[in-house]
Amino acid sequence: MLVVGELINASRKAIGEAIKAQDAQYIQQVAKDEREAGADFIDVNAGIFVGKEPEYLQWLVKTVQEAVDAPCCIDSPDPKAIEAALSVHKGIAMINSISLEKDRYNALLPVVAGTDLKVVALCMSDEGMPETMDARLRIAEKLIDGLVKNNVPLNNIYVDPLVQPVSTNNTFAVEFINSVEAIMTRFKGVHTICGLSNVSYGLPVRKFMNHAFAIMAIGKGLDGLIINPLDKMMMASLVTAEALAGRDDYCVQYLKAFRNKQFDFLG
Amino acid sequence: MSVQDIYDAVVEFDIDKVVTLVNAEVANGTDVSEILSHGLIAAMDEVGQRYSEGEFFVPEMLMAAKAMKAGLEVLKPLLSQGENEKKGTIIIGTVKGDLHDIGKNLVSMMMEGAGFEVYDLGVDVDTEKFLATAKEKNADVICMSALLTTTMPFMEVTVKAIREQGLSFKTMVGGAPVSEDFAQKIGADGWSTDAPGAVETARRLTAK
Protein backbone atom coordinates (compact mmCIF):
# COMPACT_ATOMS: atom_id res chain seq x y z
CA MET A 1 0.00 0.00 0.00
CA LEU A 2 1.38 3.33 -1.04
CA VAL A 3 0.36 6.20 1.23
CA VAL A 4 0.45 9.80 0.05
CA GLY A 5 0.14 12.27 2.94
CA GLU A 6 -2.45 14.85 1.90
CA LEU A 7 -2.04 17.52 4.58
CA ILE A 8 0.22 20.06 2.82
CA ASN A 9 -2.56 21.45 0.67
CA ALA A 10 -3.02 25.20 0.33
CA SER A 11 -6.80 24.90 0.41
CA ARG A 12 -6.44 23.94 4.08
CA LYS A 13 -6.46 27.22 5.95
CA ALA A 14 -3.40 26.79 8.19
CA ILE A 15 -1.30 25.54 5.29
CA GLY A 16 -2.42 28.33 2.97
CA GLU A 17 -1.44 30.89 5.58
CA ALA A 18 1.91 29.19 6.23
CA ILE A 19 2.73 29.24 2.52
CA LYS A 20 1.79 32.89 2.23
CA ALA A 21 3.94 33.75 5.27
CA GLN A 22 6.71 31.44 4.01
CA ASP A 23 6.64 29.74 7.39
CA ALA A 24 9.06 26.89 6.64
CA GLN A 25 9.05 25.63 10.21
CA TYR A 26 5.31 24.92 10.22
CA ILE A 27 5.37 23.17 6.83
CA GLN A 28 8.36 21.09 7.90
CA GLN A 29 6.65 20.00 11.10
CA VAL A 30 3.60 18.79 9.17
CA ALA A 31 5.87 16.96 6.71
CA LYS A 32 7.79 15.30 9.57
CA ASP A 33 4.55 14.24 11.27
CA GLU A 34 3.25 12.76 8.03
CA ARG A 35 6.47 10.91 7.32
CA GLU A 36 6.72 9.50 10.83
CA ALA A 37 3.10 8.35 10.60
CA GLY A 38 3.96 6.28 7.53
CA ALA A 39 3.50 8.48 4.46
CA ASP A 40 5.55 7.26 1.47
CA PHE A 41 5.02 10.50 -0.46
CA ILE A 42 4.31 14.00 0.84
CA ASP A 43 1.70 15.73 -1.29
CA VAL A 44 2.38 19.42 -1.96
CA ASN A 45 -0.32 21.74 -3.33
CA ALA A 46 -0.29 25.51 -3.83
CA GLY A 47 -3.31 25.59 -6.11
CA ILE A 48 -5.11 28.54 -4.54
CA PHE A 49 -2.30 30.96 -5.39
CA VAL A 50 -3.12 31.90 -8.96
CA GLY A 51 0.00 33.27 -10.66
CA LYS A 52 2.32 32.35 -7.78
CA GLU A 53 1.80 28.62 -7.92
CA PRO A 54 5.16 27.75 -9.57
CA GLU A 55 7.14 29.78 -7.04
CA TYR A 56 5.23 28.45 -4.02
CA LEU A 57 5.21 24.85 -5.21
CA GLN A 58 8.97 24.98 -5.68
CA TRP A 59 9.36 26.45 -2.21
CA LEU A 60 7.18 23.70 -0.76
CA VAL A 61 9.28 20.93 -2.33
CA LYS A 62 12.52 22.49 -1.08
CA THR A 63 11.11 23.13 2.38
CA VAL A 64 9.61 19.65 2.76
CA GLN A 65 12.71 17.83 1.53
CA GLU A 66 14.99 19.80 3.86
CA ALA A 67 13.04 18.21 6.71
CA VAL A 68 12.18 14.71 5.53
CA ASP A 69 13.84 12.08 3.42
CA ALA A 70 10.84 11.36 1.22
CA PRO A 71 9.70 12.15 -2.30
CA CYS A 72 6.87 14.58 -2.96
CA CYS A 73 3.61 14.12 -4.78
CA ILE A 74 3.36 17.28 -6.87
CA ASP A 75 -0.29 18.23 -6.93
CA SER A 76 -0.99 20.60 -9.82
CA PRO A 77 -2.50 20.63 -13.30
CA ASP A 78 -0.04 23.33 -14.45
CA PRO A 79 3.08 22.08 -16.29
CA LYS A 80 4.97 25.29 -15.40
CA ALA A 81 4.36 24.79 -11.69
CA ILE A 82 5.28 21.11 -11.97
CA GLU A 83 8.51 21.85 -13.84
CA ALA A 84 9.46 24.47 -11.25
CA ALA A 85 8.83 21.98 -8.45
CA LEU A 86 10.69 19.16 -10.24
CA SER A 87 13.75 21.34 -10.80
CA VAL A 88 14.52 21.24 -7.06
CA HIS A 89 13.05 17.82 -6.25
CA LYS A 90 15.31 15.05 -4.94
CA GLY A 91 14.45 11.44 -5.77
CA ILE A 92 11.54 10.23 -7.87
CA ALA A 93 8.45 12.41 -7.57
CA MET A 94 4.83 11.55 -8.23
CA ILE A 95 2.76 13.87 -10.44
CA ASN A 96 -0.91 14.38 -9.47
CA SER A 97 -2.39 14.31 -12.05
CA ILE A 98 -2.81 13.75 -15.75
CA SER A 99 -6.33 13.12 -17.09
CA LEU A 100 -7.95 12.50 -20.46
CA GLU A 101 -9.21 16.09 -20.66
CA LYS A 102 -7.51 17.23 -23.85
CA ASP A 103 -5.77 20.36 -22.56
CA ARG A 104 -4.57 18.68 -19.42
CA TYR A 105 -3.44 15.56 -21.25
CA ASN A 106 -1.45 17.52 -23.81
CA ALA A 107 0.11 19.73 -21.14
CA LEU A 108 1.11 16.92 -18.79
CA LEU A 109 2.19 14.17 -21.20
CA PRO A 110 5.49 15.86 -22.18
CA VAL A 111 6.32 16.30 -18.49
CA VAL A 112 6.16 12.59 -17.71
CA ALA A 113 7.05 11.02 -21.10
CA GLY A 114 10.23 8.93 -20.96
CA THR A 115 10.87 9.70 -17.28
CA ASP A 116 10.93 7.61 -14.12
CA LEU A 117 8.26 9.83 -12.57
CA LYS A 118 5.24 8.21 -11.02
CA VAL A 119 2.00 9.64 -12.32
CA VAL A 120 -1.58 9.67 -11.13
CA ALA A 121 -3.93 9.12 -14.09
CA LEU A 122 -7.32 10.56 -13.21
CA CYS A 123 -10.34 9.02 -14.95
CA MET A 124 -11.86 12.19 -16.29
CA SER A 125 -12.38 13.25 -19.91
CA ASP A 126 -13.87 16.15 -21.81
CA GLU A 127 -17.11 14.19 -21.87
CA GLY A 128 -17.44 14.75 -18.13
CA MET A 129 -17.13 12.61 -15.08
CA PRO A 130 -17.53 8.89 -15.59
CA GLU A 131 -20.33 7.42 -13.51
CA THR A 132 -20.14 3.74 -14.38
CA MET A 133 -17.40 1.14 -14.35
CA ASP A 134 -17.51 0.88 -18.14
CA ALA A 135 -17.03 4.62 -18.59
CA ARG A 136 -14.08 4.56 -16.19
CA LEU A 137 -12.50 1.60 -17.95
CA ARG A 138 -12.72 3.31 -21.33
CA ILE A 139 -10.89 6.36 -19.95
CA ALA A 140 -8.34 4.30 -18.00
CA GLU A 141 -7.51 2.26 -21.08
CA LYS A 142 -6.82 5.36 -23.20
CA LEU A 143 -4.75 6.97 -20.46
CA ILE A 144 -2.68 3.85 -19.81
CA ASP A 145 -2.21 3.25 -23.51
CA GLY A 146 -1.06 6.84 -24.13
CA LEU A 147 1.31 6.84 -21.18
CA VAL A 148 2.88 3.47 -22.00
CA LYS A 149 3.38 4.49 -25.63
CA ASN A 150 5.22 7.54 -24.33
CA ASN A 151 7.56 5.38 -22.28
CA VAL A 152 5.97 5.63 -18.89
CA PRO A 153 6.21 2.10 -17.49
CA LEU A 154 2.96 0.51 -16.35
CA ASN A 155 4.15 0.18 -12.76
CA ASN A 156 4.68 3.93 -12.51
CA ILE A 157 1.04 4.61 -13.38
CA TYR A 158 -1.49 5.10 -10.56
CA VAL A 159 -5.00 5.16 -12.00
CA ASP A 160 -7.47 7.21 -9.94
CA PRO A 161 -10.92 5.92 -10.98
CA LEU A 162 -12.54 9.11 -9.55
CA VAL A 163 -14.50 8.94 -6.33
CA GLN A 164 -18.01 10.43 -6.36
CA PRO A 165 -20.46 10.96 -3.49
CA VAL A 166 -22.75 8.08 -2.64
CA SER A 167 -25.17 10.66 -1.24
CA THR A 168 -26.13 11.77 -4.74
CA ASN A 169 -26.35 8.34 -6.37
CA ASN A 170 -26.37 5.05 -4.52
CA THR A 171 -24.37 3.28 -7.23
CA PHE A 172 -21.39 5.68 -7.12
CA ALA A 173 -19.34 3.86 -4.48
CA VAL A 174 -19.89 0.38 -5.88
CA GLU A 175 -19.12 1.50 -9.45
CA PHE A 176 -15.84 2.93 -8.18
CA ILE A 177 -14.92 -0.20 -6.28
CA ASN A 178 -15.75 -2.45 -9.23
CA SER A 179 -13.61 -0.19 -11.41
CA VAL A 180 -10.64 -0.76 -9.12
CA GLU A 181 -11.03 -4.50 -9.54
CA ALA A 182 -11.48 -4.28 -13.30
CA ILE A 183 -8.48 -1.98 -13.79
CA MET A 184 -6.20 -4.07 -11.58
CA THR A 185 -7.29 -7.25 -13.37
CA ARG A 186 -7.15 -5.99 -16.92
CA PHE A 187 -3.91 -4.01 -16.72
CA LYS A 188 -1.65 -6.29 -14.67
CA GLY A 189 1.13 -4.26 -13.07
CA VAL A 190 -0.68 -0.92 -12.97
CA HIS A 191 -1.66 0.64 -9.64
CA THR A 192 -4.83 2.32 -8.40
CA ILE A 193 -5.02 5.26 -6.02
CA CYS A 194 -7.61 7.69 -4.72
CA GLY A 195 -8.53 10.23 -2.09
CA LEU A 196 -11.49 9.35 0.07
CA SER A 197 -13.40 12.37 1.26
CA ASN A 198 -15.58 12.81 -1.86
CA VAL A 199 -17.38 9.56 -1.18
CA SER A 200 -19.02 10.87 2.00
CA TYR A 201 -19.93 14.37 0.78
CA GLY A 202 -23.33 15.46 2.05
CA LEU A 203 -23.51 12.84 4.80
CA PRO A 204 -22.81 12.81 8.54
CA VAL A 205 -19.98 10.90 10.28
CA ARG A 206 -17.86 11.20 7.15
CA LYS A 207 -14.68 9.84 8.66
CA PHE A 208 -16.35 6.57 9.47
CA MET A 209 -17.73 6.17 5.97
CA ASN A 210 -14.34 7.05 4.46
CA HIS A 211 -12.79 4.24 6.50
CA ALA A 212 -15.34 1.67 5.38
CA PHE A 213 -14.94 2.76 1.77
CA ALA A 214 -11.14 2.48 1.92
CA ILE A 215 -11.37 -1.01 3.32
CA MET A 216 -13.85 -2.10 0.64
CA ALA A 217 -11.66 -0.65 -2.13
CA ILE A 218 -8.52 -2.32 -0.74
CA GLY A 219 -10.46 -5.58 -0.76
CA LYS A 220 -10.85 -5.16 -4.53
CA GLY A 221 -7.19 -4.36 -5.11
CA LEU A 222 -6.69 -0.64 -4.44
CA ASP A 223 -3.00 -0.21 -3.57
CA GLY A 224 -2.58 3.54 -3.13
CA LEU A 225 -4.32 6.15 -1.00
CA ILE A 226 -4.08 9.91 -0.66
CA ILE A 227 -5.02 10.39 2.99
CA ASN A 228 -4.23 12.01 6.30
CA PRO A 229 -1.60 9.62 7.68
CA LEU A 230 -2.03 11.08 11.17
CA ASP A 231 -5.39 9.31 11.29
CA LYS A 232 -4.29 6.31 13.36
CA MET A 233 -7.43 4.30 12.84
CA MET A 234 -7.14 4.74 9.08
CA MET A 235 -3.50 3.67 9.01
CA ALA A 236 -4.24 0.59 11.12
CA SER A 237 -7.26 -0.21 8.93
CA LEU A 238 -5.13 -0.16 5.77
CA VAL A 239 -2.64 -2.68 7.11
CA THR A 240 -5.46 -4.87 8.34
CA ALA A 241 -7.39 -4.70 5.08
CA GLU A 242 -4.29 -5.59 3.06
CA ALA A 243 -3.75 -8.67 5.21
CA LEU A 244 -7.40 -9.67 4.81
CA ALA A 245 -7.19 -9.11 1.05
CA GLY A 246 -4.41 -11.68 0.83
CA ARG A 247 -1.62 -9.25 0.02
CA ASP A 248 0.42 -9.61 3.20
CA ASP A 249 2.37 -12.88 3.24
CA TYR A 250 2.46 -14.44 6.67
CA CYS A 251 0.81 -11.25 7.94
CA VAL A 252 4.28 -9.70 8.14
CA GLN A 253 3.12 -6.09 7.74
CA TYR A 254 0.21 -6.56 10.10
CA LEU A 255 2.51 -7.94 12.80
CA LYS A 256 5.03 -5.20 12.15
CA ALA A 257 2.30 -2.63 12.65
CA PHE A 258 1.35 -4.34 15.89
CA ARG A 259 4.93 -4.26 17.18
CA ASN A 260 5.26 -0.62 16.10
CA LYS A 261 2.31 0.05 18.39
CA GLN A 262 0.08 1.14 15.50
CA PHE A 263 -2.90 -0.50 17.20
CA ASP A 264 -2.27 1.04 20.61
CA PHE A 265 -4.87 3.73 19.99
CA LEU A 266 -7.46 1.01 20.56
CA GLY A 267 -6.48 1.04 24.24
CA MET B 1 -56.69 16.91 4.70
CA SER B 2 -55.10 20.23 3.92
CA VAL B 3 -52.24 22.07 2.30
CA GLN B 4 -50.35 21.47 5.53
CA ASP B 5 -50.51 17.71 4.86
CA ILE B 6 -48.83 18.29 1.50
CA TYR B 7 -46.16 20.30 3.25
CA ASP B 8 -45.64 17.49 5.77
CA ALA B 9 -45.49 14.82 3.06
CA VAL B 10 -42.71 16.74 1.25
CA VAL B 11 -40.75 17.13 4.48
CA GLU B 12 -41.24 13.38 5.03
CA PHE B 13 -39.99 12.68 1.44
CA ASP B 14 -43.16 10.69 0.65
CA ILE B 15 -43.58 10.99 -3.12
CA ASP B 16 -46.73 8.91 -3.48
CA LYS B 17 -48.42 10.75 -0.65
CA VAL B 18 -47.54 14.13 -2.14
CA VAL B 19 -49.06 13.18 -5.49
CA THR B 20 -52.21 11.77 -3.88
CA LEU B 21 -52.67 14.77 -1.62
CA VAL B 22 -52.04 17.35 -4.35
CA ASN B 23 -54.58 15.63 -6.61
CA ALA B 24 -57.08 15.57 -3.76
CA GLU B 25 -56.57 19.26 -2.94
CA VAL B 26 -57.00 20.18 -6.60
CA ALA B 27 -60.21 18.14 -6.74
CA ASN B 28 -61.30 19.94 -3.58
CA GLY B 29 -61.03 23.21 -5.44
CA THR B 30 -58.17 24.65 -3.38
CA ASP B 31 -56.36 27.50 -5.13
CA VAL B 32 -53.52 26.05 -7.19
CA SER B 33 -51.03 28.77 -6.32
CA GLU B 34 -51.89 28.27 -2.65
CA ILE B 35 -50.94 24.58 -2.96
CA LEU B 36 -47.74 25.55 -4.76
CA SER B 37 -46.63 28.30 -2.35
CA HIS B 38 -47.77 27.03 1.02
CA GLY B 39 -47.59 23.32 0.32
CA LEU B 40 -44.69 22.56 -1.99
CA ILE B 41 -42.40 25.60 -1.98
CA ALA B 42 -42.73 26.31 1.74
CA ALA B 43 -41.89 22.66 2.44
CA MET B 44 -38.74 22.87 0.33
CA ASP B 45 -37.73 25.96 2.29
CA GLU B 46 -38.10 23.95 5.47
CA VAL B 47 -36.02 21.12 4.00
CA GLY B 48 -33.37 23.61 2.89
CA GLN B 49 -33.22 25.18 6.30
CA ARG B 50 -32.89 21.83 8.03
CA TYR B 51 -30.11 20.96 5.59
CA SER B 52 -28.26 24.19 6.35
CA GLU B 53 -28.63 23.49 10.06
CA GLY B 54 -27.09 20.03 9.60
CA GLU B 55 -30.25 18.17 10.51
CA PHE B 56 -31.00 16.91 6.99
CA PHE B 57 -28.42 15.54 4.56
CA VAL B 58 -27.97 15.50 0.80
CA PRO B 59 -29.91 12.30 0.03
CA GLU B 60 -32.85 13.66 2.01
CA MET B 61 -32.76 16.91 0.09
CA LEU B 62 -32.82 14.85 -3.13
CA MET B 63 -35.82 12.83 -1.95
CA ALA B 64 -37.71 15.94 -0.88
CA ALA B 65 -37.00 17.59 -4.23
CA LYS B 66 -38.26 14.52 -6.04
CA ALA B 67 -41.45 14.61 -4.00
CA MET B 68 -41.85 18.33 -4.59
CA LYS B 69 -41.33 17.87 -8.32
CA ALA B 70 -43.90 15.09 -8.48
CA GLY B 71 -46.41 17.43 -6.86
CA LEU B 72 -45.45 20.24 -9.21
CA GLU B 73 -46.05 18.01 -12.24
CA VAL B 74 -49.66 17.61 -11.09
CA LEU B 75 -50.07 21.37 -10.79
CA LYS B 76 -48.23 22.45 -13.93
CA PRO B 77 -51.10 22.09 -16.43
CA LEU B 78 -53.29 24.06 -14.02
CA LEU B 79 -50.95 26.94 -13.28
CA SER B 80 -51.98 30.18 -14.91
CA GLN B 81 -49.50 31.61 -17.35
CA GLY B 82 -46.98 33.86 -15.73
CA GLU B 83 -47.04 31.96 -12.45
CA ASN B 84 -43.38 31.11 -12.88
CA GLU B 85 -42.39 34.49 -14.20
CA LYS B 86 -43.35 35.94 -10.87
CA LYS B 87 -40.60 34.00 -9.14
CA GLY B 88 -37.98 34.68 -11.77
CA THR B 89 -35.90 32.85 -14.32
CA ILE B 90 -32.51 31.38 -13.57
CA ILE B 91 -29.76 30.27 -15.92
CA ILE B 92 -27.30 27.94 -14.25
CA GLY B 93 -24.17 26.05 -15.25
CA THR B 94 -20.62 25.03 -14.36
CA VAL B 95 -18.10 27.31 -16.04
CA LYS B 96 -15.84 26.58 -18.98
CA GLY B 97 -13.14 23.97 -18.42
CA ASP B 98 -14.86 22.63 -15.31
CA LEU B 99 -16.80 19.37 -15.26
CA HIS B 100 -17.92 19.28 -11.62
CA ASP B 101 -21.68 19.24 -11.37
CA ILE B 102 -22.79 17.82 -8.05
CA GLY B 103 -23.06 21.13 -6.19
CA LYS B 104 -24.47 22.85 -9.25
CA ASN B 105 -27.14 20.15 -9.58
CA LEU B 106 -28.15 20.62 -5.95
CA VAL B 107 -28.53 24.37 -6.45
CA SER B 108 -30.45 23.84 -9.68
CA MET B 109 -32.81 21.45 -7.94
CA MET B 110 -33.42 23.73 -4.96
CA MET B 111 -34.07 26.67 -7.29
CA GLU B 112 -36.74 24.62 -9.04
CA GLY B 113 -38.07 23.65 -5.65
CA ALA B 114 -38.37 27.33 -4.82
CA GLY B 115 -40.53 27.88 -7.88
CA PHE B 116 -37.98 29.52 -10.16
CA GLU B 117 -37.92 28.70 -13.83
CA VAL B 118 -34.52 27.05 -14.19
CA TYR B 119 -32.45 26.45 -17.31
CA ASP B 120 -29.54 24.19 -16.42
CA LEU B 121 -26.85 24.36 -19.12
CA GLY B 122 -24.77 21.57 -17.59
CA VAL B 123 -20.98 21.71 -17.33
CA ASP B 124 -18.18 23.39 -19.32
CA VAL B 125 -20.39 26.36 -20.19
CA ASP B 126 -18.71 29.35 -21.82
CA THR B 127 -19.70 33.01 -21.54
CA GLU B 128 -21.37 33.09 -24.96
CA LYS B 129 -23.67 30.23 -24.03
CA PHE B 130 -24.57 31.78 -20.67
CA LEU B 131 -25.42 35.09 -22.30
CA ALA B 132 -27.21 33.69 -25.34
CA THR B 133 -29.47 31.55 -23.16
CA ALA B 134 -30.07 34.36 -20.69
CA LYS B 135 -31.15 36.65 -23.54
CA GLU B 136 -33.32 34.00 -25.15
CA LYS B 137 -35.09 33.14 -21.90
CA ASN B 138 -35.20 36.68 -20.63
CA ALA B 139 -33.43 35.55 -17.47
CA ASP B 140 -33.12 37.40 -14.19
CA VAL B 141 -30.08 35.68 -12.74
CA ILE B 142 -27.10 33.79 -14.15
CA CYS B 143 -25.67 31.31 -11.63
CA MET B 144 -22.14 30.06 -12.19
CA SER B 145 -20.40 27.20 -10.42
CA ALA B 146 -16.68 26.37 -10.33
CA LEU B 147 -14.87 23.76 -8.26
CA LEU B 148 -11.36 24.55 -9.43
CA THR B 149 -9.15 27.55 -8.77
CA THR B 150 -8.08 27.27 -12.39
CA THR B 151 -11.63 27.70 -13.73
CA MET B 152 -12.83 30.38 -11.31
CA PRO B 153 -11.52 33.19 -13.55
CA PHE B 154 -14.20 32.33 -16.14
CA MET B 155 -16.80 33.66 -13.73
CA GLU B 156 -15.18 37.05 -13.92
CA VAL B 157 -15.12 36.87 -17.72
CA THR B 158 -18.91 36.43 -17.78
CA VAL B 159 -19.56 39.14 -15.18
CA LYS B 160 -17.41 41.54 -17.19
CA ALA B 161 -19.11 40.65 -20.47
CA ILE B 162 -22.51 41.42 -18.94
CA ARG B 163 -21.30 44.82 -17.82
CA GLU B 164 -19.54 45.64 -21.07
CA GLN B 165 -22.60 44.73 -23.12
CA GLY B 166 -24.82 46.78 -20.82
CA LEU B 167 -27.01 43.79 -19.94
CA SER B 168 -29.16 43.70 -16.83
CA PHE B 169 -28.71 40.07 -15.74
CA LYS B 170 -27.74 39.61 -12.12
CA THR B 171 -24.95 37.15 -11.40
CA MET B 172 -24.38 34.60 -8.65
CA VAL B 173 -21.31 32.47 -8.03
CA GLY B 174 -20.63 29.37 -5.96
CA GLY B 175 -18.45 26.31 -5.53
CA ALA B 176 -15.86 25.07 -3.03
CA PRO B 177 -13.08 27.61 -3.79
CA VAL B 178 -15.46 30.59 -4.10
CA SER B 179 -15.45 33.05 -1.21
CA GLU B 180 -17.30 36.25 -0.45
CA ASP B 181 -14.07 38.15 -1.12
CA PHE B 182 -13.80 36.57 -4.54
CA ALA B 183 -17.45 37.28 -5.37
CA GLN B 184 -17.00 40.92 -4.46
CA LYS B 185 -13.69 41.22 -6.26
CA ILE B 186 -15.14 40.05 -9.57
CA GLY B 187 -18.30 42.11 -9.10
CA ALA B 188 -20.82 39.27 -8.81
CA ASP B 189 -24.18 40.27 -7.32
CA GLY B 190 -24.41 37.30 -4.99
CA TRP B 191 -22.76 34.15 -3.73
CA SER B 192 -23.53 31.28 -1.40
CA THR B 193 -21.87 28.36 0.34
CA ASP B 194 -24.80 25.98 -0.07
CA ALA B 195 -27.94 25.33 -2.11
CA PRO B 196 -30.52 26.74 0.32
CA GLY B 197 -28.40 29.88 0.68
CA ALA B 198 -28.35 30.19 -3.10
CA VAL B 199 -32.15 30.14 -3.14
CA GLU B 200 -32.27 32.94 -0.58
CA THR B 201 -29.77 34.99 -2.52
CA ALA B 202 -31.70 34.49 -5.76
CA ARG B 203 -34.92 35.60 -4.04
CA ARG B 204 -33.18 38.74 -2.83
CA LEU B 205 -31.81 39.49 -6.29
CA THR B 206 -35.16 38.95 -8.01
CA ALA B 207 -37.29 40.81 -5.45
CA LYS B 208 -39.18 43.56 -7.19
Image (spheres, helix red, strand yellow):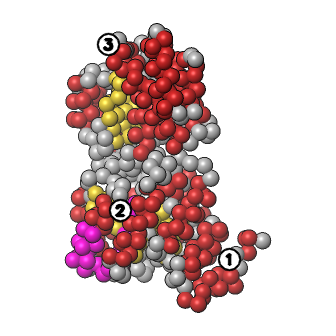
Total labels drawn = 3
The residue indicated by pointer 1 is A262
Q: Nearer the viewer, residue B177 or A159?
A: A159
Direction right: furthest residue: A267
Quadrant where the C terminus of chain A is found in the figure: bottom right
Dot label at residue A133: 2
Q: Amino acid at mark 3?
A: Gln
As displayed, is residue B4 above or below residue A69?
A: above
Left or right, B53 with respect to B134, comes to right
The picture quadrant where one finds residue A133 is bottom left
Same-chain status of marks 1 and 3? no
The x and y percentages for residue B60 are 54, 40
Q: Residues within 10 Å of mark 2 (few under 14, many from 20)?
A: many
Q: Amino acid at mark 1?
A: Gln
Give the residue number, with chain letter if any, for mark 3. B81
* Residue drawn at 21 percent across, 77 percent down: A149
Q: Give the magenta range.
A: A141-162
Q: Quadrant of residue B9?
A: top right
Disc 2 residue type (three-letter): Met
Q: Residues within 10 Å of mark 1 (few under 14, many from 20)?
A: some
* Residue at 23% in and 63% down: A106
Q: Secondary structure at mark 3?
A: loop
Q: Is residue A101 above or below residue A89?
A: above
Q: Is residue A224 visible?
A: no
The chain to which mark 1 is attached is A
> For the residue labelled by badge 2, is the local secondary structure a helix, a strand or a loop?
helix
Chain ID at mark 3: B
> Where does residue A40 sit, x and y in percent of width and height?
51, 77
